[in-house]
Amino acid sequence: MPSTITLAPEVTHVSQHGLWLLLADEEVLLPFEQFPWFRRATIEQLSNVEWPSPDHLYWPELDVNLSVASIRSPDAFPLVSRAAQ
């Protein structure tokens, strides 16, 4: 049986450089330079994040799906959208 995430992810800080996201007991940075989909989003849109599986995050209002692995190691996932840059 797959594990179930019981804690919700939480946006802990947003600056001009990026957003910090708390995933259980780990805080990760999503720099806007590497994750441009979030640059012009509102705090409400950024905060509406779902964690449907251990390696999957989803922002429904922005229609953004991300692997947690891509946040931890963005250089391992070099494809970046040119949208909203």
Image (tube, rainbow, N blue to C red):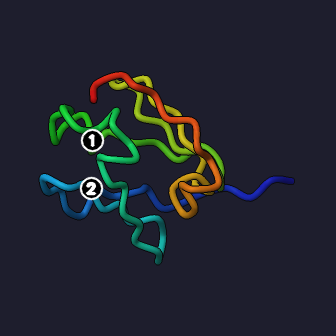
Of labels 2 and 1, the one closer to you: 2
Answer above or below: position of 4 versus 47: below
* Element type where label 2 sits in the image: strand
Residue 42 or 34: which is nearer the viewer?
Answer: 34
Q: Are marks 2 and 1 in contact (CB under 8 Å)?
A: yes
Farthest right residue?
A: 1
Question: Label 1: which residue?
Answer: 46
Residue 64 or 60: which is nearer the viewer?
Answer: 64
**Going by the image, does 30 lie left or right of 26?**
left
Residue 36 locus on image (x, y percent): 33, 37
Answer above or below: position of 82 versus 69: above
Return the mark for residue 19: 2
Going 23% across and 38% down the picture, which residue do you hit?
39
Total marks placed: 2
- 2 or 1: tag closer to the N-terminus: 2
**Going by the image, does 77 lie left or right of 81?**
right
Check disc 2 and give the amino acid type: Leu
Residue 16 or 6: which is nearer the viewer?
Answer: 16
Q: Measure the alpha-carbon separation of dots 2 and 1.
A: 8 Å
The residue carrying pointer 1 sits among few (fewer than 14), some (14 to 19) or many (20 or more) residues within 10 Å by Cα, namely many
* Element type where label 1 sits in the image: helix
Farthest bottom residue?
A: 25
Going 54% across and 41% down the picture, which residue do you hit?
66
The residue carrying pointer 2 sits among few (fewer than 14), some (14 to 19) or many (20 or more) residues within 10 Å by Cα, namely many
**Going by the image, does 65 lie left or right of 8?**
right
Residue 85 locus on image (x, y percent): 27, 29
Residue 65 locus on image (x, y percent): 53, 34
**Going by the image, does 36 lie left or right of 72?**
left
Check disc 1 and give the amino acid type: Leu
Return the mark for residue 69: none
Going 29% across and 47% down the picture, which residue do you hit?
32
Residue 38 locus on image (x, y percent): 29, 38
